[in-house]
Amino acid sequence: MPTETERLRAIQEELNTLLEQKISDLLARAKTVRELTSQLEATEIELRKSESLKSRIESEISAQAGRGAPNPDTARRAESVQSTVTKLAKTRTDLIAQLAGVAEELKGATGGLV
């Protein structure tokens, strides 16, 4: 039959194991937040670049229209850039949703401390 000291040691070991698992889980979630944040930052940069390019192309199309008919190549470029802007905006929305999900998981995992 285990002594009281042995039982306390077993409880302490179990608590240490649970704590290590909890810390490991929190570290993994923190890593996920860092990765998602990095992806979101890169997406934001690309989105701003694409929106700026779209604006320049639209100005070019307007200038061409003032001189006659717009260049079809310019119109195709505008469509391509608009497609890129739309995809990047969706990616940004998805990343924000993923970050919100991980934040909720962290909040639950820490008992609301985060």
Image (cartoon, rainbow, N blue to C red):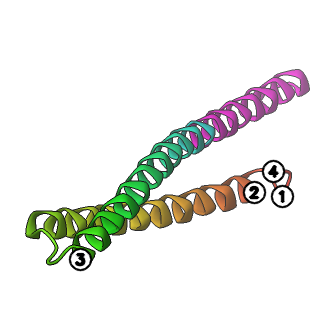
Three-letter code for the amino acid on which mark 3 is drawn: Ala
Do the CB atoms of the residues marked 2 and 4 lie less than 8 Å apart? yes
Residues packed near mark 2 inside 10 Å, few (<14), some (14 to 19) or many (20 plus): few
Q: Please tell me in which quadrant of the rendered image residue 2 appears.
A: top right
Which is more N-terminal, label 3 or label 2?
A: 3
Disc 4 target residue: 114
Q: Which mark is residue 67?
A: none
Mark 3 vs mark 1: in front = 3
- Disc 3 from disc 4: Cα separation: 55 Å
Which element is circle 4 on? loop
Disc 1 target residue: 112
Which is more N-terminal, label 1 or label 3?
A: 3
Three-letter code for the amino acid on which mark 4 is drawn: Val
Q: Please tell me in which quadrant of the rendered image residue 104 appears.
A: bottom right
Say if 18 sits above or below 74 in the image: above
In x, y percent, where is residue 105? 65, 58
Which element is circle 3 on? helix
Query: In this picture, which residue range is highlighted in magenta?
Result: 1-29
Disc 3 target residue: 65
Q: Residue at x 43, y 65 (%)?
A: 89
- Disc 3 from disc 1: Cα separation: 58 Å
Disc 2 target residue: 107
Q: Is residue 73 visible?
A: yes
- Disc 4 from disc 1: Cα separation: 6 Å
Decide whether the magenta segment is chiefly helix, strand or loop. Answer: helix
Q: Residue at x 27, y 62 (%)?
A: 81
Give the left or right position of residue 20, taking residue 52 as reference: right
Do the CB atoms of the residues marked 2 and 1 lie less than 8 Å apart? yes
Residues packed near mark 3 inside 10 Å, few (<14), some (14 to 19) or many (20 plus): few
- Disc 2 from disc 4: Cα separation: 5 Å
Q: Is residue 87 visible?
A: no
- Magenta span has 27? yes
